[in-house]
Image: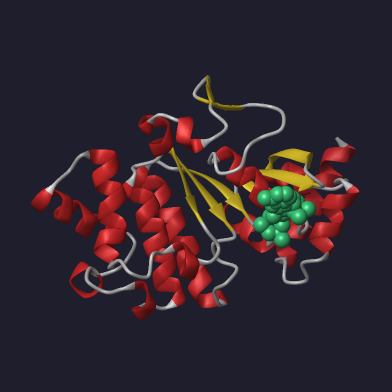
């Protein structure tokens, strides 16, 4: 599910509330029919394991003093109780899964990696918990287009391999177009639209949604044309 909306609409706040990093003023966070405590400190290990988060700035999200193997091994140990060679083997598996050769990257520190590689480590660290849901907050917006596309492909591949769901926070509707099944549109902290991707964007759509679409000159025109055709067919029907 993509979460979209203009800057300041509350996308990151929503992600941080779900992760238990920010207290909520009203409402409830319900996961598998169980209400989660507002603060992560009061959640069980199983609840913490279930929802992981990846951040926009991979630079500041990774501890510069730890090597990549430790950055992944620590949560792996905490959530799985693996130790010794089995812990190391699993760390290698996860590095391989995110496209980082273990022999080359295990002992390196974050400063020795490119932006895209750091973001792969961020993804690997989230995978180490074996979560059901990963909240991705603008994880490609600090990367150039080619590297960002690689990360999006990886995210898509991992979805099937690891049986993941994503809450994918982005202001970039071209990303929504390429990966999302469902979309939630936020404005000033409120949900404006929520539903299946093509329904949310199909005309006649909400005026605010239309503004978001119009602010994206690089949107694939074929896709929008298809939606317009689909919308006009629906209205004729
Ligand atoms: N810790 C906080 N305490 C109080 N207000 C906050 C806090 N963090 C964010 N805000 C405010 O909440 C609103 C939503 O901010 P948020 O960072 O969630 O927006 P966003 O949709 O993620 O924007 P962007 O696309 O720029 O990242 C803003 O008005 C912001 O100033
Ligand atoms: Mg944000």
Q: Is residue 80 above or below residue 89?
A: above
Q: Quadrant of residue 225?
A: bottom right
The structure's colour scheme is: secondary structure
Q: How many marks?
A: 0
Q: Is residue 218 left or right of residue 34?
A: right
Image coordinates of residue 233 in percent, x first then y, are 83, 43
Image coordinates of residue 33 in percent, x first then y, are 52, 19
Q: Is any atom of residue 142 visible in this view?
A: yes
Q: Is residue 66 left or right of residue 89?
A: right
Image coordinates of residue 84 in percent, x first then y, are 10, 51
Q: Is residue 44 above or below residue 16?
A: above
Residue found 53% across the figure and 41% down from its top: 19
Q: Quadrant of the C terminus?
A: top right
Residue found 54% across the figure and 62% down from its top: 139
Q: Quadrant of the N terminus?
A: top right
Q: Nearer the viewer, residue 218 or 236?
A: 218
Residue found 54% across the figure and 39% down from its top: 20
Q: Is any atom of residue 9 visible in this view?
A: no
Extreme residue in the top direction? 33
Residue found 49% across the figure and 37% down from its top: 40
Q: Is residue 153 above or below residue 27?
A: below
Image coordinates of residue 199 in percent, x first then y, are 74, 42
């Amino acid at each position: 599910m993509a979460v979209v909306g203009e800057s300041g609409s509350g996308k990151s706040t929503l992600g941080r509330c779900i992760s238990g990093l920010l207290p909520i003023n009203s409402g409830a966070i319900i996961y598998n029919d169980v209400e989660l405590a507002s603060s992560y400190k009061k959640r069980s290990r199983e609840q913490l394991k279930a929802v992981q988060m990846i951040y926009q700035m991979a630079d500041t999200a990774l501890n510069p003093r730890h090597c990549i193997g430790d950055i992944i091994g620590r949560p792996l140990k905490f959530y799985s109780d693996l130790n010794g060679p089995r812990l190391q083997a699993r760390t290698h598996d996860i590095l391989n899964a995110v496209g980082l050769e273990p022999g080359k990257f295990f002992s390196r520190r974050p400063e020795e990696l490119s932006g895209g590689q750091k973001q792969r480590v961020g993804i690997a660290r989230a995978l180490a918990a074996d979560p059901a849901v990963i909240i991705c907050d603008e994880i490609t917006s600090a990367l150039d287009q080619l590297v960002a596309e690689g990360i999006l492909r990886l995210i898509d591949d991992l979805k099937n391999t690891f049986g993941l769901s994503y809450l994918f926070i982005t202001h970039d509707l071209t990303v929504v177009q390429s990966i999302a099944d469902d979309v939630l549109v936020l404005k000033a902290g409120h949900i404006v639209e929520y539903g299946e991707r093509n329904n949310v964007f199909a005309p006649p759509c909400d005026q605010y949604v239309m503004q978001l679409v119009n602010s994206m000159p690089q949107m694939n025109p074929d896709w929008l044309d298809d939606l317009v055709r689909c919308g006009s067919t629906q209205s004729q029907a």
